[in-house]
Structures are given as C-alpha cells and as structure tokens.
C-alpha cells in the first residue's frame, strides 16, 4: 500500500474541508476515494466539487462496505462517532475521528477496546497539539526545570457564536442531538491541551450556565475550579457569548510563570524558586527577583493536515499519531465532570463515576427539545478551517 484510501463520513463544514485538502493532494500519503452523507444537498455538493473518482454514498455503512477504502474519517454529529468507529473497526478499517471522540467516556472506552481487538489504528483530530506554542509549553512543564505546577488559569472566551450558528442544525445545542454546548463542541481542544500539558486534576467544581447568552438548552458559559493531586489549583473559564473574547493561558511554576496569549509564549523566570525564597528571605514584602522574556518556539503549525499525515504514516509505516484514541478519554473526562458537578451542584472527584454521569445525561436527553433548522447560515472555514 503506497497511499491510504480514505472515506469521509459526514461532509458538512469540517468534513468538506477535509475532502478538499485530501483531494487537492495536500496529504501526499492519502487518497480520497469515498464520501457519505445522509443529506442530499451535501451529496450534490460532492458531485459538483470532488473528483469523479470519489464514490458517493448515502450512509456510512454503505461506504464502509464498498471495498473502496482502508480507513474512515468521521465528521458527523458527536453521538454518531462511537457507533461509526466501532462499526469501522469490525469491518477491518482504521479510524480517525473528529473531536470529541464521543459524548461520554464509557463510549470512548468501547471504541478503544474494539480498536485493540482488531489491532487497528485509532486516531483523534486534536489538531491544536501541532501548535508550536502548546508543544513548547508541554516541553517546559514536563522537563521539571522550573519545578512543579502551582496554579493554572485558562480564560478561553474567544469562541463567539451567534444565534444563527446554533439555529443552523437541528442537532446543534441540544442534549439529545449534541450532548452539550461549549464544553463539548468548541472546548475539546482546550480541555485536551489542559490535561496534555498540566496533567489530570483530582477534583472539579463547575458552574455551567445553560442558555445564558443564546436561546439554547445547553451550556454557553462555564466557570470551573480544579484541584490537582500535588495541591495545585486551576480555573477554566469559557463562553460563546463574549465579544471580544480572550484566549490567555497562565501556568505558575515554582520558578517561573508561563503566559500564552496572541500566539506568543512569555515567561517570567525567577532567580530562585518561590518556595525557597518564601522560607529564606527576611523581608516580609520582598518578591523573588526575576525578569520577563519571550520564549522562542519553532516547528510547523500543521493543524488538521498534520493530523491527517500522521494518521496515514501510522497506517503505512507504524509512525506516531498526533493523538491516540486512548487519549480521548482524558479531555472528555474533564467536560463530563464539569457537567456533572454543575448538575449536582457539588464538587466531583476523579476518577469520574461514569455510570452516574450517563444517568444524569440521559435525564437531560429525555427532556431535550426538538427544533427546526434555519437555512442560509454561512460559516467562515478559511485558515485552519474551523475547530
């Protein structure tokens, strides 16, 4: 096999952009051979915009049974990710899933178990892991050169969405159609990065405001407090209702403060550890000395295409994935725990009680309202084509 023949299930905003990138040969070790979408309008789009060699199907099952593919990329609404992935593994296909891997962690465990059962590649579209700033942050924290984490603050409110966005799909912003709001749609990248860089907390208290800024039933404004096993604390704040929003990640270490904002990574490097200074200085108000500097970062910010290339390389040559299927559990655990804490109005300890979460989610799904889809809504999918 010289190229991975891939079929894309779900060719809406994200799926159609993946189609273009592969069809235009931006992924040299991958070939688009099939697509599927239950909506006739998207199949018509495929006929008009994709090469004639690409087979077009109505369902994912038809695509998977076609014999035209070696792997599938799933870009459907969230609840279908596990169902399609497991079906793909059973048919001997490698799987790359858009984020999140599923709506609740028990689903993702089932996906991983099925992938292992058939010895197949399972990757996740966590494209922000290719960002050199976040990669450098992880490198610094993991090195231990500046001591342990003391505090983490991430204010990530530049996910602004209008009511038109939420009205654009009957599945959007509903418990039964999407399974959540900003935590499950926009923030899987941030929650994945949070645990990838800083590790997993042991306790979460969250306040998820449902329909605070929009006419929706799921959360669009969240403030969460985190506690870590070493005593560090954190705050995670996000919203789709702030304009202009902010994306500022601060990590306080014992001998440095790291700040990621506006595409730059700044560090305030202390001359000695704050812990050492605290217990040795004879001055009550004296802070440890240090200075700000910009941290140089290097490397390609390959985003979605980097994930696709790595996925194909893992299949063809045993290369490393950007994010393995097993890693989809951690970030989803954080969002599940935030939801559960807010619903129960109490702190939630990790490991998460997965059965309790699913029980509470199903209560929300039972009362989920049906809605109509608005037409004529436009999305800007330029640049790194959305996330």
Image (cartoon, rainbow, N blue to C red):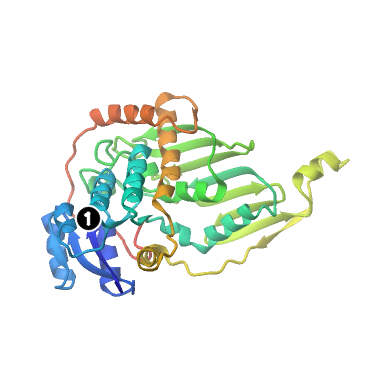
Q: Is residue 271 above or below residue 341?
A: below
Q: Quadrant of the N terminus?
A: bottom left
Residue at x 24% of width, y 40% of height:
177
Q: Is residue 226 above or below residue 5?
A: above
Q: Nearer the viewer, residue 141 or 384?
A: 141
Left or right: 372, with 220 as reference point? left
Residue 191 position, x and y percent, is 46, 46
Q: Nearer the viewer, residue 150 or 223?
A: 150
Residue 122 position, x and y percent, is 35, 54
Residue at x 35% of width, y 43% of height:
108
State the count of labels. Answer: 1
Q: Residue furthest right?
A: 282
Residue 14 position, x and y percent, is 29, 58
Residue at x 43% of width, y 51% of height:
189
Left or right: 57, with 256 as reference point? left
Residue at x 22% of width, y 55% of height:
10
Graded by Cα atoms within 10 Å as few (under 14), some (14 to 19) or many (20 or more), the crowding at tag 1 reads many
Residue 363 is drawn in which quadrant? Answer: top left
Q: Nearer the viewer, residue 326 or 188?
A: 326
Q: Is residue 200 above or below residue 18?
A: above
Residue located beneath label 1 in the image:
10
> In this view of the protein, can residue 303 be seen by the observer?
yes
Left or right: 292, with 322 as reference point? right
Q: Quadrant of the C terminus?
A: bottom left
> In this view of the protein, can residue 367 be seen by the observer?
no
């Amino acid at each position: 096999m010289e190229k991975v023949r891939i079929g894309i299930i779900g060719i809406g905003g994200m799926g159609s952009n993946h189609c273009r990138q592969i069809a235009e040969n931006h992924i040299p070790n991958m070939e688009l051979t099939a697509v599927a979408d239950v909506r006739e309008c998207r199949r018509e789009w495929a006929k008009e915009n994709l090469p004639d060699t690409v087979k077009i199907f109505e369902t994912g099952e038809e695509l998977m049974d076609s014999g035209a593919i070696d792997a599938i990329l799933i870009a459907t609404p969230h609840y279908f990710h596990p169902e399609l992935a497991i079906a793909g593994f059973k048919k001997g296909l490698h799987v790359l899933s858009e984020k999140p891997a599923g709506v609740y962690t028990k689903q993702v465990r089932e996906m991983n178990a099925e992938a292992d059962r058939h010895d197949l590649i399972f990757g996740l579209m966590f494209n922000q892991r290719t960002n050199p700033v976040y990669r450098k942050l992880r490198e610094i924290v993991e090195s231990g050169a500046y001591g342990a984490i003391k505090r983490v603050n991430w204010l990530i409110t530049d996910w602004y969405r209008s009511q038109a966005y939420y009205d654009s799909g009957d599945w959007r912003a509903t418990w039964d159609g999407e399974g959540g709001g900003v935590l499950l749609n926009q923030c899987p990248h941030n929650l994945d990065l949070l645990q990838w860089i800083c590790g997993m907390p042991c306790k979460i208290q969250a306040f998820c405001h449902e329909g605070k800024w929009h006419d929706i039933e799921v959360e669009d404004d969240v403030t969460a407090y985190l506690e870590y096993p070493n005593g560090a604390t954190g705050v995670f704040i996000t919203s789709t209702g702030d304009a202009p929003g902010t994306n500022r990640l601060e990590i306080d270490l014992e001998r440095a403060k790291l700040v990621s904002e506006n595409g730059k990574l700044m560090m305030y490097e202390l001359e000695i550890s704050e812990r050492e200074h605290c217990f040795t200085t004879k001055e009550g108000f004296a802070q440890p000395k240090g200075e700000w500097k910009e941290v140089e970062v290097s490397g390609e910010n390959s985003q979605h295409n980097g994930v696709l290339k790595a996925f194909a390389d893992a299949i063809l040559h045993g290369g490393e994935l950007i994010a393995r299927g097993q890693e989809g559990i951690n970030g989803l655990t954080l969002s599940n725990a935030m939801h559960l804490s807010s619903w129960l109005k109490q702190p939630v300890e990790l490991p998460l009680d997965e059965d309790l979460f699913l029980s509470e989610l199903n209560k929300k799904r039972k009362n989920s309202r049906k809605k109509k889809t608005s037409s004529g809504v436009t999305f800007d999918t330029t640049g790194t084509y959305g996330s």
